[in-house]
Image (spheres, helix red, strand yellow):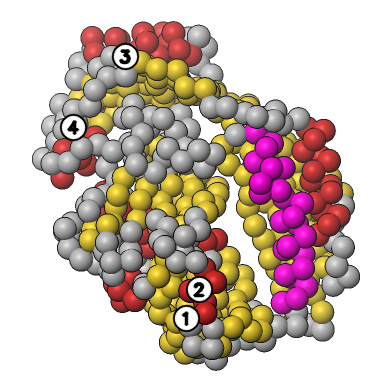
Amino acid sequence: MLEDYSDKMVQFALANGSQYCDVRAESVQTTGLVIENGEVENFISSSDSGLGIRVLVNGAWGFYSVSDPKSFDNVQENVIDVIKSARYYSEHTKQKVKLAEIRSSVDEVNFRVQVEPTTEEMIRIGLESDKIIRNKKRIIKSSVSIHHDQFHKYFVNSEGTKITHNFDDVIANLSATAHYSGLTESVNTTEGGRGGLELLTGKNNILVTAQSISEKADALLDARTVKEEKATVVMNPDFVALLAHEILGHPSEADRVLGKEMAWAGGAWWAGKIGTKIGSPELNVIDDPTIPSSLGWYKYDDEGVPATKKTLIEDGILCTHMQSRETAALFDASPNSSMRATGYSFMPLIRMACTCISPGNWNPDEMIKDVKNGYLICNMKIPSIDMMRYNWSISCQYAQKIENGELGELLRDVIVMGNSPEFFESIDARGKDFQVRPIANCGKGDPMQIMRMGNGGPHIRGKSIVKSVAT
C-alpha cells in the first residue's frame, strides 16, 4: 500500500503545483536485547513504517511525513497544505532552490545476509560475550547489547526514478568497567555493520573482542597517566575512525561549508579552499558508500543518486565536498550521493557514508620502529571539536609509550589535541592496513537526526599534543 501511495502522490503533487516531488516509503523491523552482569535486562521488538513526501514549489521546499497512513485522501489534504506553505515561503525568500540534474534510475537492491539473525542466537552470543567480559576479578560491570534491524525503502520521484532497497543492520555494543582502590576504568566497542550475524561471528568475532576489552579495562587500573608534551603519535585505525569522522567527514559536508549548519552544528574552516593544499602529501581521504558491510553501504542515496566513491583530499589537496542536488547546483558540481535521512519522518541531509583516510605503504610496526619518542594512540573515546572543525581534542581509551622504536608501558586517561591544518601537515606515514569501524550514533540537524555510517583508515603517524585528562 505504501508504494502505491508513493507513486500516486508524486502525480498528485505535480498536478497541484509542485515542480518536483519525491516520496520515500519506508519500514523497519527491530529486534534486540540488553545484557548486564549476566542478566538479560530487556528485549526490544518494534516496527515502524510511513511516508516522507518532499515537494519543490517555485524554488522552496515543503515536507510532510505520516506514519502508517490509513487514507490516501487524508495524505492528499496534508500535501496540499504543504504545497501552499512552500508557495508562500517562496514568495518571501530570495534564495531559490535549484536542483542539479541527475539521470533517472529504476532498480531493486537486495543486500546479502549470510547468517540470518535469530533472537536465540543473539541471546547465546550476548551471554557468552558477557561471561567472557566478567572473567577478570576486577571487572565490576559488563554490558552487551545486540540489535538487528530489517529495512525496506522505496524511493520514487517525479523524474522517473523508482528504487527499492532491502537491507539488514546488525550492531553490538560491548563495555567492560573495572574498579580497584578508588580508580574506575572502562573500555567499550561497537561492532557489526550492514549484513547478518556473520558480522559478529566471522572475522570480527565479538567473543575475541569481549576478551580484549575485559583484559584492557583490568590492565588500565595499573597504568599511569602522561605529562603534557607535543610528540609524535601513531594512531590505530579505531582512533583514526573518529578522527576521520570529526575533522575530515563533517567539514566536507557542503551544507556546513555553506554555513547552513552553523546554528546548531558548525561550519568548516576550509570553506572556499577547494584546490588548496591543506595537509601533507600523506593526507588522502575518501568517502565511499560502496564499501561492503559498512554501515554506510548503499547503492543510491535518498535523492536517488547512484552511490559513488568520492576523493575528498588527494595528496594534501582539498578536492571536493559531499554534495546534495541543491548544493551541487550552488557549487557548479555534480551531486555525489551524499543525501540521507534517518527515516521517512525526516528531510534528508548531507551525511558522510564511509569517510576514511586511505591506506599507504608503511608496515605499522615499521612506523613505530621509526619513532624515537612518542605514543601509540588506541581506540576512540570522546571528541571535543570547535564549530569550524579547526581546533580539536579527542580522548583515547588507552595508549602506549614509544621509546627508541619500542612499545613501552600502558597509559590511561590520554587526550590528543591539535589544530587541523597543523596536524594534517605533520602526517608523514600511513599504514598498509585498513579498517572500517561502525559509527551508529552520529547526530546532525534540527530536529536532530541520528545516523549510521562507517569511518576508518590505517595506522597514521603525525605530531600533536598529548596530555592527561586530569591535567
The CA distance from mark 2 to mark 3 is: 58 Å
Q: Position of residue 287 (x, y in %)?
A: 37, 47
Residue 227 visible from this viewpoint: yes
Q: Nearer the viewer, mark 1 or mark 3?
A: 1
Residue contact at pointers 1 and 2, CB within 8 angstroms: yes
* Residue marked by disc 3: 10
Q: Position of residue 122 (x, y in %)?
A: 77, 38
Q: Residues within 10 Å of mark 3 (few under 14, many from 20)?
A: many
Q: Position of residue 372 (x, y in %)?
A: 49, 88
**385 lies above or below 434:** below
* Residue marked by disc 1: 370
* Residue marked by disc 4: 100
Mark 1 belongs to which amino acid?
A: Asp
The span shown in magenta is 196-220
* Residue marked by disc 2: 366
Residue contact at pointers 2 and 3, CB within 8 angstroms: no
The CA distance from mark 1 to mark 4 is: 48 Å
Quarter of the figure with the C terminus: bottom right
Q: Nearer the viewer, mark 4 or mark 3?
A: 4
